[in-house]
């Protein structure tokens, strides 16, 4: 009796673009179908591909949601390989997806105080974490989110985060900041100004946060992350990091 070998499990599957929404000339939201059985933790990333070119993208949606939501920044060639292809996608187009989400930039519940620091698309894991936290009806944590961008139209999820902070003031404090307040594109901005890494110390002092019960997360531009670490770690704060390189 002979046994036929089992077919190898496919390392990629196809999914479909369900919707997209332009945020600015080089930023957009995209929703793709969630493959059957696709599980992930809030803060993890999926791996998408076109024509064999693959990159990892953090997932905006929380695990309980039915679709995979993404916030993508266009990086033109020669630095960008996949995002120009993603930028051309329309509703109904197909894209490959690896069958498992990955990543360790996830919620660590051991610290009652959670400080999220982000630049532009680096806000994505935090949105996922907050959505899931609210959905679960969890308790016992306090979140502070510092979100930086050059221009106001790069503050994706600004409205959602403001709504959460207004509805749950004892859960989330949200501070967006603009690094180029004098430019015409930011003419109507009346909020905080400066690079997000340069205001972290001010706000942690203002909020009277202590290293022993506070975990600082930094996600986005690598230089921002390094500066946050150099500012926070000597003061005794633990820093959890996720770097977004070009075309990621």
Image (cartoon, rainbow, N blue to C red):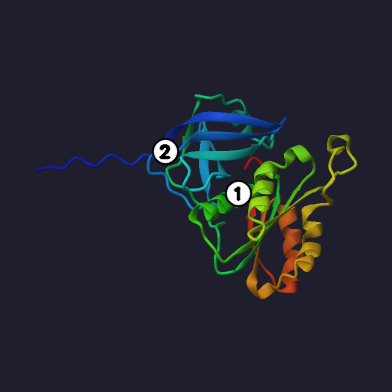
Q: Position of residue 159 (x, y in %)?
A: 68, 42
For disc 1, the marked residue is: 127
Of residues 172 and 186, the one nearer the viewer is 172
Q: Identify the residue shown where x is 81% and y is 63%.
A: 202
For disc 2, the marked residue is: 35
Q: Residue furthest right?
A: 182
Which part of the image, by quadrant, shows the C terminus?
top right
Q: Identify the residue shown where x is 51% and y is 40%.
A: 68
Q: Is residue 89 left or right of residue 3?
A: right
Residue 68 visible in the shown view:
yes
In primary-sequence order, the first of circles 2 and 1 is 2
Q: Position of residue 205 (x, y in %)?
A: 79, 68
Q: Position of residue 168 (x, y in %)?
A: 63, 55
Of residues 91 and 191, the one nearer the viewer is 191
Cα distance between the residues tagged 2 and 1: 21 Å
Dot 2, how many residues are within 10 Å of its Cα: few (below 14), some (14-19), or many (20+)? some
Q: Secondary structure at mark 2?
A: loop
Q: Residue furthest front?
A: 167
Q: Is residue 64 left or right of residue 20?
A: left
Q: Position of residue 38 (x, y in %)?
A: 42, 44
The disc at residue 158 is: none
Q: Is residue 218 left or right of residue 67?
A: right
């Amino acid at each position: 009796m002979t046994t036929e070998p089992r077919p190898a499990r496919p390392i990629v599957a196809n999914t479909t673009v369900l919707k997209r929404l332009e945020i600015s000339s080089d930023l957009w939201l995209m929703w793709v179908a969630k493959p059957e059985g696709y599980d992930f933790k809030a803060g993890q990333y999926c791996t998408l591909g076109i024509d064999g070119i693959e990159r990892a993208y953090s997932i905006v949606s929380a695990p309980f949601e039915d679709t995979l939501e993404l916030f993508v920044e266009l990086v033109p060639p020669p630095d960008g390989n996949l995002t120009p292809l993603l930028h051309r996608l329309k509703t109904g187009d197909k894209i490959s997806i690896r069958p498992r989400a990955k990543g360790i930039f996830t919620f660590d519940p051991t610290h009652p105080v959670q400080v999220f620091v982000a630049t532009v698309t680096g806000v994505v894991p935090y949105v996922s974490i907050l959505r899931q936290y609210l959905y679960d009806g969890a308790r016992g944590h306090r979140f502070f989110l510092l979100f930086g961008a050059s221009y106001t139209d790069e503050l994706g999820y600004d409205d959602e985060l403001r709504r959460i902070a207004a509805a749950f003031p004892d859960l989330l404090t949200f501070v967006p900041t603009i690094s180029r307040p004098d430019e015409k594109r930011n003419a109507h901005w009346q909020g905080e100004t400066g690079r997000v890494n340069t205001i972290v110390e001010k706000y942690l002092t203002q909020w009277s946060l202590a290293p022993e019960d506070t975990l600082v997360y930094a996600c986005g531009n690598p230089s921002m992350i390094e500066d946050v670490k150099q500012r926070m770690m000597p003061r005794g704060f633990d820093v959890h990091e996720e770097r977004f390189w070009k075309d990621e």
